[in-house]
Amino acid sequence: MTSSSDLLLGQATPLPSSPEEARLDRVPNPHADTDYVARFTAPEFTSICPVTGQPDFAILVIDYVPNQWLVESKSLKLYLGSFRNHGAFHEDCTVAIGKRLAGLLEPRYLRIGGYWYPRGGIPIDVFWQTGTPPTTVWLPDTGVAPYRGR
């Protein structure tokens, strides 16, 4: 079990220089006996194109049905921010974030949608999930419109 003194929460914490360096914290789920959806939306996600070095921008929507663990939101914010100077393609960023969260949390279900702004005139939307959502939860639409000049 993670004690509150071990968490990044409540401590001055610099932005990690890379996703590999970034630490993700988890905390016990006080409602592990209940299926529900937790959503995180990162409307200003950025990374770097590994070919051109130019910035890429996305809206990330992460939905998960927790099991025993919740992701601690400050550590998630710092982890996502660590991609700011990280060179990777859109697909790699989106799927890597989903896999890292799924590995840490072992949720009943997790999905991530990466809605990337156009580069070279083409928007790229990337979706990844761990399986089928439980039938006992309401899984709302991500709220991000199909591309029309977001």
Image (spheres, rainbow, N blue to C red):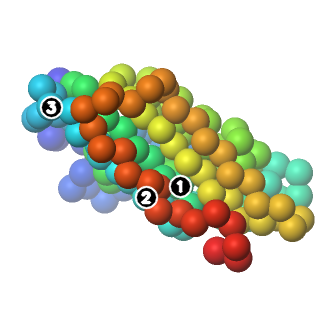
Q: Which residue is mark 2?
A: 41
Element under label 2? strand
Residue 115 position, x and y percent, is 63, 57
2 or 3: tag closer to the N-terminus: 3
Residue 140 position, x and y percent, is 38, 52
* Circles 2 and 3 in contact, beta carbons < 8 Å: no
Relative to the observer, which residue lies in front, 25 or 33? Answer: 33
Type of the residue with mark 1:
Leu
2 or 1: tag closer to the N-terminus: 2
Task: Tell me the CA gap for discs 3 and 1.
Answer: 25 Å
Residue positioned most to the front: 135
3 or 1: tag closer to the N-terminus: 3
Q: Which residue is mark 1?
A: 60
Q: Which residue is mark 3?
A: 34
Q: Residue at x 16, y 40 (%)?
A: 5
Task: Tell me the CA gap for discs 2 and 1.
Answer: 6 Å
Would you call the spot at circle 2 few (<14 residues within 10 Å), some (14-19), or many (20 or more)? some
* Circles 2 and 1 in contact, beta carbons < 8 Å: yes
* Residue 48 lies in quadrant: bottom right
Residue 97 seen in the current view: yes
Task: Tell me the CA gap for discs 2 and 3.
Answer: 22 Å
Element under label 1? strand
Q: Which mark is residue 135?
A: none
Q: Residue at x 64, y 74 (%)?
A: 150
Would you call the spot at circle 1 few (<14 residues within 10 Å), some (14-19), or many (20 or more)? many
Relative to the observer, which residue lies in front, 45 or 35? Answer: 35
